[in-house]
Amino acid sequence: MFPKFTIIKVESNSKAVIGKLDRIFQGKEKWIDDNYIGALLKGSVIAFGRWFKEKSFWRFQFNADESNKLSLNTGETVYAIDGYWGERIEIVYSTKIDWKKEIFKSKKNWDHEHCAICWAKISEFENTEYYLGGGSYPVCKKCYKNYVLIKDISFVPSV
């Protein structure tokens, strides 16, 4: 599925974990490299941070507000996600986002949005009916039905 990150050390302050990756590519896309933004996915919980290469190991340094999201242990394996796809996974899995159906109306100097998952255009002429999550995540009806509603992340490119 996604690159696997096996944890060999959990720092005592839980702000970072050190481990080994089984790969840094997802298909042809380089998902992980030194100083790349990324995420760790455990079940349906995702936490963001940054990758740092340390000899033959990798350090994942959590963002300040993300370190308490995951409970991680030495020897555990989780998925490594790149930042771009991680943002979309978080939208799908989040239990804190309230969704409501909307009809797009143009505003002064603002004639469209893009779906936060597939990037389809949302406007008065295309995908007029859409869902707005948390007041800031526009999602087309197709992505809402196929992914958000059923918590499916199959839109993320596989190997």
Image: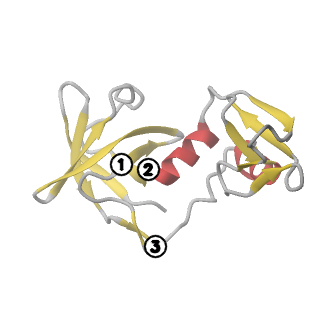
The residue positioned 63% from the left and 29% from the top of the image is 95
Q: Quadrant of residue 74?
A: top left
Which sits in the foreground, 157 or 79? 157
* Closer to the eye: label 3 or 2: 2
Residue farthest along the bottom direction in this orientation: 28
Indicate the position of residue 100 as horizontal and vertical percent values: 81, 31
Looking at the image, residue 144 lies above or below residue 65: below
- The total number of labels drawn is 3
Residue at label 3? Answer: 27
Residue at label 1? Answer: 37
Earlier residue among tags 1 and 3: 3
Which sits in the foreground, 32 or 21? 32
Q: CA distance from mark 1 to mark 2?
A: 5 Å
Q: Is residue 150 visible?
A: no
Which sits in the foreground, 106 or 159? 106
User: Could you classify mark 3 by the number of other residues whose Cα lies within 10 Å: few (under 14), some (14-19), or many (20 or more)?
Assistant: few
User: Could you classify mark 1 by the number of other residues whose Cα lies within 10 Å: few (under 14), some (14-19), or many (20 or more)?
Assistant: many
Q: CA distance from mark 3 to mark 2?
A: 16 Å
